[in-house]
Image (cartoon, helix red, strand yellow):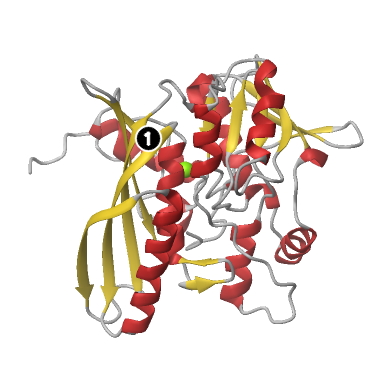
Amino acid sequence: MAAPAAGWLPTTTMSRILLSHGAGGRDMLQLIEDVFRSRYSPAGVSQDDSAVLPLDEASLALTTDAFVVSPLFFPGGDIGRLAVAGTVNDLLTAAAQPVALAAAFILEEGLPLADLERIVLSMQETAAEAGVSIVTGDTKVVPRGSADQVFITTTGLGRILRPGVSGAAAQPGDAVLLTGSVGDHGTAVMLARENLLGAAPISSDAAPLTEIVLNLIRAGVAVHALRDPTRGGLAATLNEIAGQSQTAIQIQEDHIPIQPAVAAACEALGLDPLTVANEGKMVVIVPPGEADRALAIIRGSRYGERAVAIGTVLPGPAGRVQVRTAFGTARLLEMPTGELLPRIC
Ligand code: MG
């Protein structure tokens, strides 16, 4: 491999990787821009969650995600369910029907085989639910201490059903829809990890959202943008879309569903539920005239029963996300910074 060209050091002032570089917020975006996008293919690497590959017959979507969640098992899911749902949902954000998945496992010496089997079964069940198969994979085992139990990388291939769906395609006037409550996954994993006994039980929302997205596309809804609010939560997702599309987004705080137990846990942990990861939710941006129909379709689909309209896309200022409270006041919702919650997915 050739030596890197002069000037290869990232513009970030940090000389080592920090936990915040994996948190889904500003530091991670900067790392991706400075270290990866600038070298791989500045023009070609998408800022969306899947790359779009135009071929002769059909356009394909390609995405990959690594999963390092701790603990491996938590209420509502496990690393296997996450590894499938996360990659499936990233394909769906490109309005792509999942076609096939590949899974690579890094296993730590000493991992109980029963744990691996439980994870693999969960992956198989989640893939079946999403209507996709895991068709190839890889297994590596590293010495005890070189990894923590199991890390999984899942790659997904999808066939694009509706071209042009992208965070960059949000337009002023569009309605911003959310398929359900926020903060469930992140708080569920945190409570499980910290073993906070006595805390109200919270289940992760980890789920493949195939039915919601395919129902929207097949009904011909003119979807502009889809994005799953995972790391960095709703705050990161809305900031990404506002930045990509050079629009502003305004949301109504009291329209955002937050389960009482999640709100209480976030309060106790000092977290803003709008920055906490979700693994079974989608932000759906549609033209204003399509909002009611889209909402009805989402609510009639699995995992979309609690869908709501939370806001509107505005012409500008570009990249700004504003939250209006029930009292009529407004605050900026910024791209999250700092380390947030490591090993949440
Ligand atoms: Mg995503």
Label 1 secondary element: helix
Picture quarter containing residue 139? bottom left
* Position of residue 219 in the picture relative to residue 183 (left or right): left
Picture quarter containing residue 149? bottom left
Instruction: Indicate whether 47 appears above or below 81.
Output: above
Instruction: Indicate whether 193 appears above or below 222.
Output: below
Q: Quadrant of the N terminus?
A: top left
Percent across and percent down for residue 62 are 31, 38
Taking depth in this image into account, of 155 and 48 the one nearest to the observer is 155
* Position of residue 326 in the picture relative to residue 312 (left or right): right
Residue at (32%, 53%) from the top-left corner?
A: 133
Residue at (69%, 57%) from the top-left corner?
A: 271
Percent across and percent down for residue 160 are 37, 29
* Position of residue 42 in the picture relative to residue 89 (left or right): left
Count of all numbered marks drawn on residues in the image: 1
Residue at (62%, 53%) from the top-left corner?
A: 276
Task: Please say whether residue 213 is visible from this viewpoint.
Answer: yes
Report the residue marked by disc 1: 33
Amino acid at dot 1: Glu
Instruction: Indicate whether 61 appears above or below 222.
Output: below
Residue at (20%, 69%) from the top-left corner?
A: 140
Percent across and percent down for residue 79 are 44, 65
